[in-house]
Image (cartoon, rainbow, N blue to C red):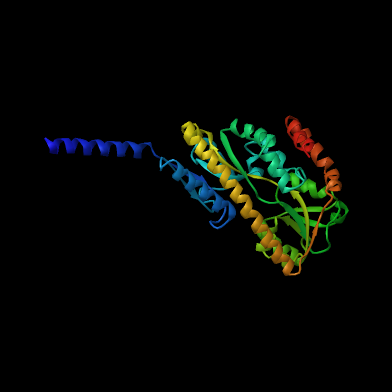
Amino acid sequence: MTRVVLNIALAGALSVAALNAADAMEMRGWNIHVEDYPVSIAMESFADEIAEKTGGELTAKVFHNGVLGDQPDAIEQMRLGVIDFGEFNLGPMGQAVPEANVTSLPFIFTSVPEMYELMDGEVGEKIGEGMKARGIMPLAYYSAGARSFYNSIRPINTPADVEGMKIRVMSNDLFVKMVEAMDGNATPMAFGEVYQSIKTGVVDGAENNTPSYESTNHYEVAKYFSLTEHLIIPECLCMSLRTWDKLTEEQQKIVMDAAKASAISQREMWAEREAASLEKIEAAGTQVNTVEDKAPFQEAMAPVYDNFLKANPNLTELVNLIRDSQ
């Protein structure tokens, strides 16, 4: 009789264990960056906190280096629930979520702290509403820093300093028009070609964030780095709405809290990385200048904004919300 009771108890325990295992969910996450990048480290901490706080009911595996596909494809897979979560730049996100395109407008944010304040508030909520309408649940906004101009000719302090310069830009009509609005010559090209192109005079300069300028050794061929911070495009740690809707309210709170904590950590790590890169390029002889007055640049962008809002009149309110908050 005792053996029968023990067998029944054991069978019950095994059934509960099997049920718990069946109820457990492992989520797959997309990340374009290498494993030691600030974004990657923050995403791993996000995954660890979810597993710890849910007692293993939810686990998350982050796939780094873009192994689950390129960014536009991964965004679409997340919308369909094939990928559960990911960390995406709002530039490419604009293809699926038009509201995200406003963050690609040059000088729309005047500083990184301002971007944090607005994206953590009403502006981020408005863009988030657009994401949710298209199957994406925004969790937290990460930093990709600020993009600034660098070149081999002279420091840039005013829009007039860009006149006549051949500047490499990303393949985006907004960025081409940005340089043209300052009477420069925009040259879209692959990022891997920039170093040699500056060295041989095919272009005079380019634009990017400080860690990219430093890590690619572009400071060797373009010694003037001007902190214009003309593009401050946030990134989003997001989840498929299909995955989000499968979670209990308690699990949703755990996921959201873990995302917010990871964003704080990522922003801090990014700031440290930027400071280290700035120190390195200055030690190497780069002439760094800070553009304190961005108003002339913002005024020069009037045609860019006019064309954008003419093509996207429904985004006028969102653009004005950002401008009125400054």
Would residue 300 be found to the left or right of residue 9 on screen? right
**Residue at the image point whose x is 49% and y is 46% from the top:** 49
Would residue 158 be found to the left or right of residue 123 on screen? right
Quadrant the C terminus occupies? top right
Residue occupying the far front of the picture: 2
**Can residue 73 be seen from the camera position used here?**
no
Nearest the eye: 50 or 214: 50
Would residue 126 be found to the left or right of residue 50 on screen? right
**Residue at the image point whose x is 65% and y is 48% from the top:** 143
Residue occupying the far left of the picture: 1
Where residue 42 appears, x then y in whole percent?
55, 50
Nearest the eye: 90 or 195: 90
**Residue at the image point whose x is 73% and y is 30% from the top:** 314
Would residue 198 be found to the left or right of residue 238 on screen? right
Where residue 291 appears, x then y in whole percent?
82, 54
**Can residue 302 be seen from the camera position used here?**
yes
